Image (spheres, rainbow, N blue to C red):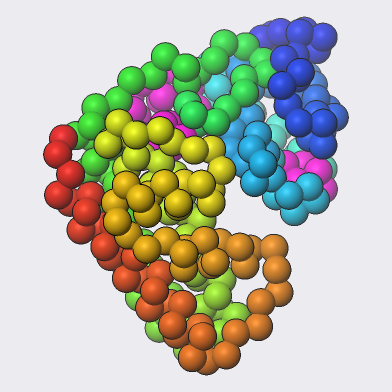
Amino acid sequence: MAAKNDELNLALLRSEIRDSVSTFTEKLIEKLGENLKSVTIVGSSLTDDFVPGKSNINSVLVLAKHNLDSLNSLAKMAAPMRKKKLAAPLLMTPAYIERSRDVFGIEFLDFQLIHQTILGDDPFAELSFTKKDVRLQCERELKAVLIRLRQGYIAAAGQKRLISDILVSAVSGLVPLLRAMLWLKDSDRPDRAQAVFTKAQAEFSVKTDCLISARNWRHKKVRLGDNEIQQNFEAVYAATDRLAAIVDELEE
């Protein structure tokens, strides 16, 4: 077994999630046994972006090996996890992490910046990445966001609520991308989303006010008129398109 229950490193977790994470991890130890090597909390639950009762608690589990028994054990825990706002964990092995640094640099850089390993060895602290791989992933992901925006707008068929949801999803996904772009420029990477947008605006000369506004719709019921939703869509699309052009020109 990876560790005893009383060896959990919970002290640096915010008080609102500590009990849920502790119970979750103890269940993991019980169900996964020796196959569980580490448990790491990642993302907004470790920052001031966290909204109790609304934001999910995200985690990465490192396993010795992938097997169906582990998946079945976690599937049986899914319902109580949802009640505690615990998102389905990402499952990785040490070999998977090592072999994926070239294709998941954006994600791993974000985990490396914002994480707390509460059980076992830290899987992200010592990872290194090449700027060539990260720049290429940033370009690919930004152009994919543009495709999703176009397709989503068509599929929404003018329904404002759906267009709003598409914008919120797209803008939320831009936060780790922008952190990676700041990393490419050897610039500091804030942990809070709004600070990331503000820093990116200064670093890349791209207007990000529309991105901040759209992201703030996540936990609110926003009523926008037809002209407003179209203006917001155009602004978010233009900012994303500009970022894609900028990352295309970044030196590796």
Residue pushed farthest front? 202
Answer with the quarter of the image where residue 81 lies.
Answer: top right
Relative to 139, residue 13 above or below: above
Q: Could one spot residue 24 in this view of the protein?
A: no
- The picture places residue 75, in percent across and down from the top left corner, at 70, 40
Question: Quick check: is 38 in the magenta stretch?
Answer: no
- The picture places residue 93, in percent across and down from the top left corner, at 48, 22
- The picture places residue 13, in percent across and down from the top left corner, at 73, 26
Q: Please provide the residue range marked out in magenta.
A: 81-110
Q: Could one spot residue 73 in this view of the protein?
A: yes
Relative to 248, residue 240 above or below: below
The quadrant of the picture occupied by the N terminus is top right
| Left or right of residue 205: residue 71 | right
Relative to 67, residue 139 above or below: below
Answer with the quarter of the image where residue 222 lies.
Answer: bottom right
Q: Residue at x 24, y 27 (%)?
A: 130
Of 61 and 215, the residue lying toward us: 215
Of 17 and 238, the residue lying toward us: 238
Relative to 165, residue 68 above or below: above
Q: Residue at x 23, y 32 (%)?
A: 131
